[in-house]
Image (cartoon, rainbow, N blue to C red):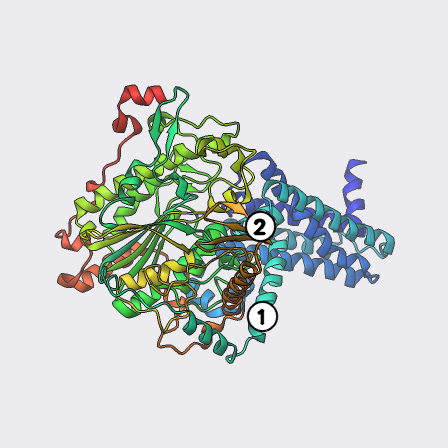
Amino acid sequence: MKRSYAPKFLNRRMGFFLLMVFLFWLKTCFSYLFEFNLGIESIQQYLILLINPFPTAFLIFSIALYIKSPKKAYTTLFILSLLTTILLFSNVVYYREFSDFITVNTVLSTGKVSAGLGESALKLFRPYDVFYFLDYILLIFLFVRKKIKLDASPVVIRKAFAITSMSLLLFSINLSLAEADRPELLKRTFSRDHIVKYLGINAFSVYDGVQTYKSNQNRAQAKESDLVSVQKYVNSHYAAPDQTKFGIAKGKNVIYIHLESFQQFLINYKLKDANGVEHEVTPFLNSIFKDKSTFSFTNIYHQVSSGKTSDAETLLENSLFGLSQGPLFTQLGDKNTFQAAPAILSQKAGYTSAVFHGNAGTFWNRNETYKRFGFNYFFDSSYYNVTSDNTSQYGLHDKELFKQSIQYLEHLQQPFYTKFISVTNHYPYPEFKGAEAGFPLAQTSDSTINGYFATANYLDKSIEEFFNYLKESGLYQNSMIVFYGDHYGISKTRNPDLAELLGKTKDTWTDLDDANMQKVPLMFHIPGRTDGSVSSVYGGQVDVLPTLLHLLGVDTKNYFQLGQDLFSKDNEQLVAFRNGDFITPKYTVLGDSIFDNATSTLMTTPSNEVKAEVKALRKKVEKQLSTSDALNTGDLLRYADNGFKAVNPANYNYKNQLEQLTKIEKQKGAKSTSIYSENHNTSTVDLYKTKTYEQYFGPSTATQNK
């Protein structure tokens, strides 16, 4: 009975259909586990991984069930299965080289694929790749030998429709499980890895196609004449530099230090432990904040939306806002034309640029977006020694990031423009154990808040160690170090539980308090200056780039930047948020609510004069945001003719970068300006010293604080 059951089952259309679905599921799961690095972190994610091939396979393959002709039905099913397998296998091969998935734009940009693979394509194949197509060879053999026969009986339409409906139900279940594990999955697309992990290759391809179609429609409808109104706005919005600050950092290296999830209230904050003893959370950053070589700001707000960290990068590198829905990096980052800081500084002052980040290069689509920004080098997790002991959910621990980056930093030609993206101070704020443990946890009812201060303290120590290296290596005096917070670390829903640590109570916490919690640090540390100050000027992340360029002696008048120099007397001090809310020195406007900043109270019956003033400000905010959207969604910078040479992403290759750097050093010979060359071709890696918490505070203190 068992011997005759299988052939009989396979000789039915529905049985053969289920076999093809199962075979596709098997190949997909194999690729998930052995080909793609999807970062599976829980049993639930493994479950989702096992489920997600089924919905789209049932949906696509069910097309063949509606065909009555046996030959056409089987042929259609065979072709549909083969096409989905080819799509899967193509992504497998592409991933081996690029650690990324194929997008519609990748297919359309055949030059990029051929340039990336070229003669090395054959080297990407593995002997076991035959596994992906072995089933078709066997099935053809079985059909030829008539071990499997065509079923002449068509599938009842009702049954075919039930299969199609079931596939949609399965997809709904799959999506619900995915959203439960990763909220706003489709709205906040962190990386293509996430879509594939949660929804599968087929769903990702459809999603990417829809997003590409939407962006291409916006792009197609945009006209060169649309840039005229943008140019007019940019010209009228330009804030001339303060001549006492213009060029004071000219020719210096730029080192951006990304303070992950770091809010302004942490500066100079002291946390009380269970015994009432106060502990300074960020002593080193506090010293930098008030240093006479630092220009610090107390009223700078983050302006990110769903793109979070990537939105902050969009703002800082381009002086443009992120999108109203979804991250610009993932939706337009590999499509649009940009006039970003690394390219501007390369063209205007011969800067070399690099980003150091201990997470996957595909996260936030950085590996593609950075090329269009003009970053010469991007060192992602593949360039670091990442282990289970030195990493957390979002990448390499900060001390390791700085320490392991020196081997690359020392070979960069000066002047350079660099960015170090820290991640340890990121939700859910990992708890340190062993030598790094020691800083006390906060005493609130929210465990997330409790760990926030310890990871911020760890970040502070990481930066102090990096500063020590800069001084020891000789890079410090010729560099401007810029600190910025990317977005909030404690969300609005948790703020009431934080209130007690800030001298308030849950009952007295207001929307204005929530708005004030969106302040993030901004510090320009310029060694050698003695006129540093702490400014109360209001501004946002969109204002950082024009401020930075003016400090470097590059006038922003001819660039399409929507921010204003924070030192300029023409600065309007109008901070727009992506949702249309805004803040000025006088008012905080949240929806229809107007708060008086001087008294920190809600204006229940604002005067007509105040209403008129707020209405005018709101129009300015809407104009700034709509101008940004026009530039981004229409890709209007492709039409720009302002003397900027458009970036060609094909000129950038983030593979074998240390080899690229040392090759340049050898070519330049005595003219090489890297710190490695200036140090007589001797590495500076050993100059970087790292310490444990106990080495900072002593065994007794560390033990006491645990």
* Res. 123 visible in picture: no
Q: Quadrant of the N terminus?
A: top right
Amino acid type of the residue that numbered disc 2 sits on in the rendered structure: Val
Quarter location, residue 661: bottom left
From what the image shows, is residue 454 above or below residue 369?
Answer: above
From what the image shows, is residue 280 above or below residue 116?
Answer: above
From what the image shows, is residue 496 above or below residue 234?
Answer: above
Residue 33, image x, y percentages: 54, 42
Q: Quadrant of the C terminus?
A: top left
Q: What residue lies at 19% left-to-right and 55% top-to-bottom?
A: 478
The reply, left or right, for residue 308 in relation to residue 4 is left
- Is disc 2 in contact with disc 1, using a CB cutoff of under 8 Å? no
Residue 544, image x, y percentages: 37, 58
Q: What residue lies at 41% left-to-right and 33% top-to-bottom?
A: 453
Asked which secondary structure carries label 2, the reply is: helix
Residue 293, image x, y percentages: 22, 50
Q: Which residue is mark 2?
A: 196
In-front residue for pair 134/93: 93
In-front residue for pair 353/577: 577
Identify the mark at residue 111; answer none if there is no mark: none
Asked which secondary structure carries label 1, the reply is: helix
Which dot, 2 or 1, sits closer to the camera?
1
Q: Which residue is mark 1?
A: 218
Residue 169, image x, y percentages: 75, 47
